[in-house]
Image: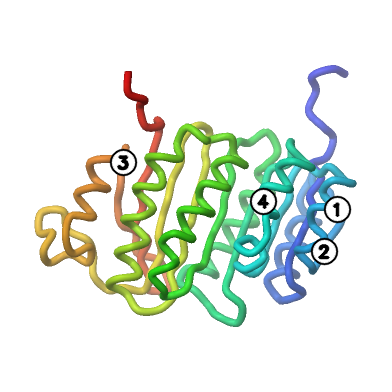
Amino acid sequence: MKGSPPEFTEVLLVQPPDAAALRLRTALISAPRIEVVNELTDASVAVDAAAQLQPDVVVMRVELRDVTENSVLGELRDTAPWARIVLHAHIAQQGAPGRARWIGRLIDVVVATVNSHTLEARLELPDDPRSVSLARSLLTQLLGQWEMEDFVDLATLLITELVSNAIRHVPGTCAVELTRRGDALRMAVVDTGPGVPNLQSPGLSAFGGRGLHIVSALATAWGVDRLEDGSKAVWAELSTPLAEDE
């Protein structure tokens, strides 16, 4: 019947053969109206597989270098333009705060993709100043994939402040988590820092100078969540893109 929803949501899985992969695969196979059409362990063949299968969703749990050293996101958009990309780009042999929580969310968002506009991505970044430009680049690619290009200018300003302060003040890896829910965008940076940013006392906050004030001025909403593993997520939301100059 024309206009009726598809009987199944077809999912292409690209992930390493580890315990998290087994958990995700088992959850998807058990979910109603979900069909795993193929499962790959090599990100380099994901584009060809997506072009051939034209899945509804591509779930990619891959090493960070798979998306930074290749143009896989852009190629996926070209070869499977209707596929929704759910991305977890991680650092090989390194953990990052909030990962266990993320795997649970990953399962939920893929299963809920039927008749849903929620999309998720997580980028685990090394303790390196170059991670700031890397986060901006990957954010821009993902917003293009998610058809949110109008948010790029404002979102990159916010992600620059959030990642810069995590890298500057908290040793170790951090993670950028992005969520598109309808027409709204949420950006969170997860780190292990014990401090809580304080808008009234910028000199004493984990943000140091004016970073938090910039976030507060540009974002629709912002806040800090304490996670079960002891890490924190500093988040900012956008509900409208940056207005163009008249």
Residue 144, x across and y down, in percent: 58, 40
SS assignment at label 4: helix
SS assignment at label 3: loop
- Mark nearer the viewer, 1 or 3: 1
Q: Quadrant of residue 165?
A: bottom left
Q: Amino acid at mark 1?
A: Ala
Question: Which of disc 2 and disc 1 is earlier in sequence?
Answer: 2
Instruction: Kindly identify which residue carries mark 2.
Output: 40
- The reply to whether the C-beta atoms of the residues labelled 1 and 2 are less than 8 Å apart is yes
Instruction: Kindly identify which residue carries mark 4.
Output: 73
Marks 3 and 4, how far apart at CA = 26 Å
Instruction: Kindly identify which residue carries mark 3.
Output: 219
Marks 1 and 4, how far apart at CA = 14 Å
Q: Residue at x 71, y 63 (%)?
A: 24
- Mark nearer the viewer, 1 or 4: 4
Quadrant in which the C terminus appears: top left
Marks 3 and 2, how far apart at CA = 38 Å
Q: Which is nearer the eye, 156 or 29?
A: 156
Q: Residue at x 40, y 39 (%)?
A: 153
SS assignment at label 1: helix
Q: Quadrant of residue 40?
A: bottom right
Q: Amino acid at mark 3?
A: Ala
Q: Is residue 237 visible?
A: yes
Question: Which of disc 3 and disc 1 is earlier in sequence?
Answer: 1
Q: Residue at x 10, y 59 (%)?
A: 201
Residue 198, x across and y down, in percent: 17, 58
Instruction: Kindly identify which residue carries mark 1.
Output: 49
